Image (cartoon, coloured by chain):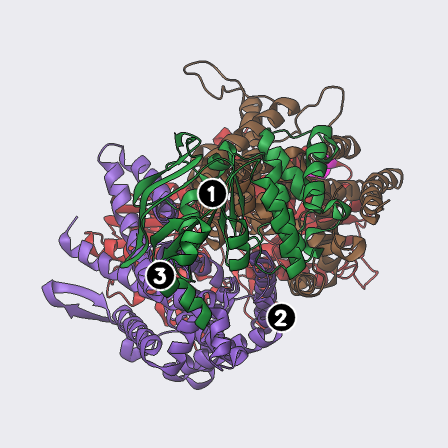
Amino acid sequence: MSTLLLIEQTLNGLQFGVMLFLMAAGLTLIFGVMGLINLAHGSLYMVGAFAAAAVAAATGSFILALIGSLIAAALAGVIVEMTVIRRLYDRDHLDQVLATFALILIFSEGTRWVFGSFPLFLDKPAWLSGTVMLPFGIEYSLYRLTIIGIGLVVAAGLFWMIARTRIGIQIRAGENDREMIGALGVNISRLYTLVFALGAALAGFAGALIGAIQSVQVGMGEPVLILAFVVIVIGGIGSIKGALVGAILVGLTDTLGRLLLPQVFGLFMEPSAATSVGSSLSSMSIYILMAGVLLFKPSGLFGGGH
Amino acid sequence: MKLKQLILAASMGLAAAAAQAEGVKVGMITTLSGGGAGLGIDVRDGFMLAVKQAGRSDLEVVIEDDQRKPDIAVQLADKMIQSEKVDVLTGIIWSNLAMAVVPAATAQGKFYLSPNAGPSPLAGKGCHPNYFNVAWQNDNLHEAAGGYASDAGHKKAFILAPNYPAGKDALTGFKRFFKGELAGEVYTKLGQTDYAAEIAQIRASDADSVFFFLPGGMGISFLKQYADSGVDLPVVGPAFSFDQGILQAVGAAALGVKNTSQWSKDLGNAANEAFVASFQSEYGRLPSLYASQGFDTANLLMSAMDAADVNDQDAFRAALEAAKFDSVRGDFKFGPNHHPIQTIYVREVIQEGDVFTNKIVAVGLKDHADAYAADCKM
Amino acid sequence: MTDPILDIRGISKSFGALKASNNITLDLHPGEIHALIGPNGAGKSTLIKQVAGGLTPDSGTVHFAGQDVTPLSTAARAQLGMGRTFQISSLAMEFTVLQNVVLGALGRRGDVFRFFRPVMKDKQLLEQAHTALEQVGLEDFHSFRTSELSHGQRRQLEVAVALTLEPKAFLMDEPMAGLGAEGTQRLMGFLDGLRQRAPILLVEHDMDAVFALADRISVLVYGEIIATGCVDDIRGNPVVRTAYLGEEDAA
Amino acid sequence: MKRETYLNAALLLILLVIPLWAQSADEPFIITLTTRAVIFAIAGVGLNFALGFGGLVSFGHAAFFGIGGYAMGILAYHAQTYTPLMEFPFVIEGTKSMPVIWLTAIITSALVAVGLGALSLRTSGVYFIMITLAFAQMFFFFTISWPTYGGEDGLSIYIRNDFPGLNTMDPIQFYAICYVILLLVLFFVYRAAHSPFGLALSAARQNEDRIQAVGQGPYRLYLTAYVISGAITGLAGALFADLNRFVSPTMFSWQTSGEIMIFVILGGVGRVFGPVAGAALFILLEHQLGGLSEFWHIYLGAILLGVVLFARGGLFGLFAGREVAHD
């Protein structure tokens, strides 16, 4: 195995991680501020992808499609927050899990009702297609590189927002002490709607970005949702920094595990058995990682007292 | 329990000369909701189109949705057999659901006509006189892809499939007919959507071609990412990732890819031309591979109904074995294990106006039978 | 003098730069009520947690009934006979009053891993429970749901549960808090008699109660014991007056 | 008498009358459907033991359901193919005997629950929900890619396993087996809920400080509850596999965990008979809504949402009111 391949795979792991971060950031913010477990976060990811596909089909513009995904997912987020989620904040986790599980059913079948049972078409624009040459002769997909860039910019933006802006102060206050923000004279229900819409928009944005290189279909959100949960649990629920670290960790573990594990087993097993065992183990690798982290740090790497 | 069992008895009373005293009741269990519903809908629509065209009063079809869950499929099969008292079962899309339903159904004396799945146990040791596969044995299209890859002069193939039984069958099938060597063999996670890691491995290998079996959304994701990766090795695959239902979602990324199929919409026989035209006018979309299989299944069934009474199992079985119907694939006959012996074509993905579709470019394997027939003792 | 039941030897605990407990030494002898007072934020709760379990000191040891219990869990300490009441009522709110007390008796007896015998028909447990309820004056309320009790009644119930444990010493964290004058009087009378059964380490805000009840008083300020002595010593101690009582007057 | 008692009795009666009626009306499928409800009820009663009584929100009980299923699948598969399960260090043969299979399912699930529980219970809250989910996912991916027992295709067992003196292929006789097991499980859980252990566990759920202050560590209580819960759900998995004569990794999927949770919540968390009502209602909904529309999941979602938002306490909360404390 060449170093080149390893570097390229590391980039792939990074790209995967950055994408997971977009999902996980919203999830972790919503949990941190409102104390809500939102299983329907994956549905917002799907809404973003479908909206992007619909806008792209109508206008032919990828930029408009991305904007469409942001708006549609944020809007869906606001509607869901105001009608359902709002009633769940002071419920226990069990009620939240069940209610948002129900939302998944409604979102998935509703989307299928509107858009039909077949996958939709969404492609990246021509100006982001193809590959670029990186130093050391690494040929890498321009689009994936763009995703890494966008993801890092969004991460930086989030950190800035939380550290420097008014809304960020309110969010931090909310994470520390839910009663305190009421005392600060903040309109709590508006803040909650805003945070939820922000999380939804990020998820929808991720859905649109990824939909362009994957498949835009009903049910696309659930696998990503579970991964995003793994990410925030590893990082520590409520921590944006934890979400970023966790996302990159999961992205790298998954990608490099798929590459390396079969090879490791190939050292002492016959090739096809090694491929089989290695693949089995790599499909479990991130869950093993998560269990491992929780055993040593029961509230995640950067987890507080939740 | 009322509406969905779209019970379709034909409107025209004047049935064929060989009308039976009592009709045949068919139970169709297929995937109509959730992920993968598109395949089931196509099979159903193809099947019901044939039923509608025949306009028989002696054929009743009960349709149920298995949600792609094996336990639901088993439960529905029980219901069809115990409550509906059907004579024939059909409709299952997925191999794992077929493995859950078929052995029990045939053991209880029902006929099962498979419009899609063809797991190897049912073609070999687990074959049954009442089980007929109207589509293919699972390995068939992969074998043809292997054969074609050799014919096309590929020497080193990189092959990948999901890590589950059908995926392993696929790679085994490909290797069975591919004469070159392998540049790499990778099993991916079932349901995986990001293939950057695998594509990087392809790039790093010295392969001269790529074979993949990634049904449904996995194939869409792979093709889009592959097209964007700058790796431009020729790609071969079975028809599943290139059928009419998902080709539009892949778009230009699939153009030029060779895929193997026992059916294509440009097959030049009269039955097929009529089928494509009528499917399009009935449903407003092009038929897929799955629709053609559903259509053939219904016509096979009706041809047997014309020749024998379903209650006379031996006679009905013989009539099914004879397969005297106009298949949209042209010639169609069953091998000794009740799986098709058929020609598998190589298609290329092309663009016709706005629509992406396939055209036949070569014959992959002629009159091909499956590898498991010898294990079948019945 | 007899050996102390509870002997806290030089324990310290820091949270970052904050020294919550600084070399605290404290003991509790049979038959006495030893009150621990101090302003808010002096580190009383931190100290109680280290004594009762749940928080391990950075250094120093806690001895109870002649045994070093520093490494033991809260539950193990309770098993040894530390009867604790909480500052904020910690009862099973869905239970009836009787169930809460039976739970205490059950915990004392220790055979919780029995799956088939109806616990609320166990004569021995019921008898102990009713006795404890009578002692704190809650017998009339035994079938009430705990969440329906008033604040003061919950305090009494906490004490009743602690009684069923037949403890060697009581650890009471502000038992008078939130009680009315009448309730405080009644509880004081009760605690006064209780000290003969087992000594009490009493953390309390109510100065009148402390001065009326305590045999000895320790004053905790900024994590340190600044004085220990009998009521008159403490009353007259100028350091205590400025550090603590003066502050209290001002507030 | 309490209303809850009437409701319990009514439930058991309904589950007795429906199959008998179906038998006389020659509707064997209704019996199969009721069997399904009864088996799901057992799985739910199992989860409820941890979730309702111990407050342990396990989102991974599919792991035990699947282990029970595979215990049946693997034993019966070896019996079916006449191959020994293990030859070294001593020979273990497969079996078609239901009691042996049940015992294996219970013991295996319990052992796995000891391991998973010991690890998972180090965490709490959301972390516990997610780590249990992660463990179940590990089983799911493992069985999918483990070729020996069929991988994703699963295992078909052609004929139901044997129970002495009964013809298990007859729907009503198999139903009788499941119904009796449900009764036994309910009896055990009812007794356990009112036992010393039940009191201590419930106290631990309500207030961990309290249980510690009376000298009992919550960890051992939780772990025991989790193991019992897993064993019961594992037994349900073995029965479910026998009902379908089929096992597959779907039994391990996170949707399965979600469904078992739904049975509990629909019926009423912490009520001994809650999951029975929940599972029965779920099967009824699935059956009735499935006939209404291809998009019936929307209705199912809406109903679930309605229950969570407006009918707290599930069916039992609705019909039997707030839980009465046990005296």
Colour applied to chain A: purple
Mark 1 vs mark 2: in front? 1
Query: Which type of secondary structure does the marked residue at label 3 adopt?
Result: helix
Is A10 rendered above or below residue A143?
Answer: above
Residue at figure coordinates x 24%, y 37% from the top left: A266
The answer to whether mark 1 and mark 2 are in CB contact below 8 A is no
For badge 1, the amino acid type reads Leu
Q: Which subunit holds the residue at mark 1?
A: D
Q: What residue sits right under mark 1 in the picture?
A: D121
Query: Which type of secondary structure does the marked residue at label 1 adopt?
Result: loop
Q: State the image coordinates of residue D103 (x, y, percent, origin top left).
A: 60, 25
Same subunit under labels 3 and 1?
Answer: no
Q: Which numbered circle lies on residue B283?
A: 2
Colour applied to chain C: green
Left or right position of A148 against B271? left
- Farthest residue to the top: give it: D90
Left or right position of A144 against B8? left
- Quadrant in which the C terminus of chain B appears: top right
Q: State the image coordinates of residue B333 (x, y, percent, origin top left).
A: 56, 45
Colour applied to chain D: brown
Q: Disc 2 and disc 3: Cα gap in Å?
A: 97 Å
Q: Disc 1 and disc 2: Cα gap in Å?
A: 55 Å
Q: What residue sits right under mark 3 in the picture?
A: C238
Residue at figure coordinates x 53%, y 62% from the top left: B288
Residue C19 or residue B347, whichever sits in front? C19
The answer to whether any part of residue A277 appears in the image is: yes
Same subunit under labels 1 and 2?
Answer: no
In the rendered structure, which segment of residues is drawn in magenta?
B313-318
- Quadrant in which the N terminus of chain B appears: bottom right
For badge 3, the amino acid type reads Pro
